[in-house]
Image (cartoon, coloured by chain):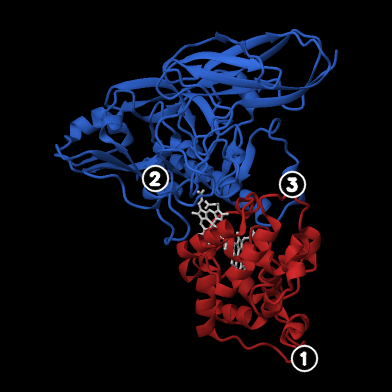
Chain colours: A blue, B red
Amino acid sequence: MSESLSLSRRTLWQRMAQILGGLAVWHQVRPAPAEQTASPETGPQTVRVMRPYDAETPVREFTSYLTPNHRFFVRSHFGPPAPELIAAANWRLHVGGLIEHPLELTLKDLKEFEQVTITAVVQCSGNGRAFHRPKVPGVQWERGAVGNAQWTGVRLRDVLAKAGVRPNGKHVQLQGADRPVVSSVPLFTRSIPLEKAVHPDTILAYDMNGRPLPLLHGAPLRVITPGWMADSCTKWLTDITVQADEAKGYYMQTAYRVPVTAIQPNSGLPGTSMVPVEAMVVKSLIALPANGDQVGRGPVTVQGVAWSGDAAVATVELSFDDGKTWEQARLVGEDEPYAWRQWQFLWRPKTAGAVTILCRATDANGQVQPQESPWNPGGFLWNGWDHVAITVAL
Amino acid sequence: MMTRSLPLIGLFVLGLAGLAAMTAAQEDDLASVSAALAPRAEGLIIARCSVCHSPDLVSQQRLPKDRWAATVDKMKHWGAEIADDEADLLVRYLSARYHPAAPDHLPTLDHELRKAEPLTQEPADTGPLVGVSTRGAGIFEHNCQACHGAGATGGMGPKLAKNPILKQDDLFWETVLHGRGPMPAWGSVLSQQDIADVHTWLLTK
């Protein structure tokens, strides 16, 4: 019984691996003439990198409150780990470092802790990198490396409480099972400060939108740090280590950092100190109409989403005259702390021709979405006004 | 005298040295630089750079030369198998084709690539190549191991040790020279002697 189960699971893994690795590579290792035909607005997912697979969600999907798992953006540095490493029989969560009782937990053990569900936006720190000028190296994400999902799991604080954090433990290092193909590449090792780790809303999630976490999204377990960018949301989690200091290594000490104060573009690495990317900044997106759409006399429903890091969305405004005047959209639908807020605006176009619709949000702390985000060498935290270019035919 | 003869030498020296001696006028013409370097550079990108990630991660960047140099340097540091002259050529190519003002959608390279010349043209009449197994081990490690695993036991690419294809010379050479699907083409990266050496070494596995 268990044999046939594991066999079929293996076939499934193999097929997924083929699809993810083989087919992906097949299309991309050789320059494919057709590769640029899928439009970002209409494809099932907009692929940015075939291997390891990085893809964003077409923004029209953001007309729905929850982003479906198969459309949810995918990002990792090395792709999913080898299936054996995360198979239920082998996978363990290790908790070590500056704690009283080292733990080694199976998924079943983990599910003994109190279960919680949180709806939260997860956004890649590099979402919108393609809009920074001058351009910066990295995956050229546009608008869709973000999504809103319902995450179910257990509180990281409960697990840490069981292990017993020692007084000198100040940072919690997170390590997943994913590995680079060549071992000289640094591992994706991250850490979050203890305060964030023991926040009651920081969870270790095993379900996404009511389904077991898909492989591409970190099966069997990933970290969710509501309100913070996804560089803290380690997938395929296997090791939690409590430490006195921040994690060492490229992905913590060099990458995913921004200057504390604004710097001049291309001024090289700033003399100002660099701090880790943590909380999200206020941001909104127009889901419909889509770039290139043609609309009539209307009324046209303009709709989208808006969110912020640690405050609620207060207002969403639209401009149809390049930012000279702004009109307030109506906030609609669910209102949950870490989720995004949907908004709508009924628009009656008066003149025919090309129009760019601009959108900006303001949060309850008074943080306003800027026309352009401050330039930074990693191209993180883009939250410039969103815009779509459409045509009005009356 | 000397300044006048420099461009002339450039015309006569083939391969890397010739590209390095490209005149200032040609340097200005980014498109012609990138076209001239494309066959060899694209060969390197497929053979050396796509070990860890698909080349689309490279082609979507639009960077000035210093950022390209820093990027290639970082990759080398992380394990990309590229010699200094290859890195130099790549930076010149990448900064000519994928510079900040280049359009988002560049014409595809298929056409230019088809003209790719093998790195070394062995005369056809020297008789069969004799592979040297000990050399082959090193060539395998630097070029093939990342995908085919240590000892050729398989990885992201199939197991090559005891693979029946090793006994089918034509098919082996065809696959290695021209690539197949995700398997890079090595014709413009390795010499025929290199390939014969790897082949001989694989047969001992």
Badge 3 element: loop
- Circle 1 Cα neighbour tier, 10 Å, few/some/many (<14 / 14–19 / ≥20): few
In which quadrant of the rendered view does residue A196 lie? top left
Q: Is residue A156 left or right of residue A278?
A: left
Image height of A94 relative to A297, above or below: below
Subunit of label 1: B
Image height of B70 relative to B119, above or below: above
Image height of B132 relative to A9, above or below: below
Mark 2 in CB contact with mark 1 (< 8 angstroms): no
Residue drawn at 69 percent across, 30 percent down: A41
- Circle 2 Cα neighbour tier, 10 Å, few/some/many (<14 / 14–19 / ≥20): few
Three-letter residue code for mark 1: Asp
Q: Is residue B176 visible?
A: yes
Location of residue A94 in the rendering, given as x and y in whole percent from the top left corner: 27, 43
Label 3 vs label 1, nearer the camera = 3
Subunit of label 3: B
Instruction: Looking at the image, tell me whether mark 3 or mark 1 is earlier in sequence order.
Output: 3
Q: Separation of disc 3 and disc 1 at Cα? A: 44 Å
Residue drawn at 74 percent across, 63 percent down: B28
Q: Which residue is mark 3?
A: B105
Q: Which mark is residue B204?
A: none
Q: Residues at marks 3 and 2, common chain?
A: no
Q: Separation of disc 3 and disc 2 at Cα? A: 36 Å
Q: Which mark is residue A272?
A: 2
Location of residue A49 in the rendering, given as x and y in whole percent from the top left corner: 60, 46
Q: Which residue is mark 1?
A: B125
Foreground residue among A72 and B130: A72
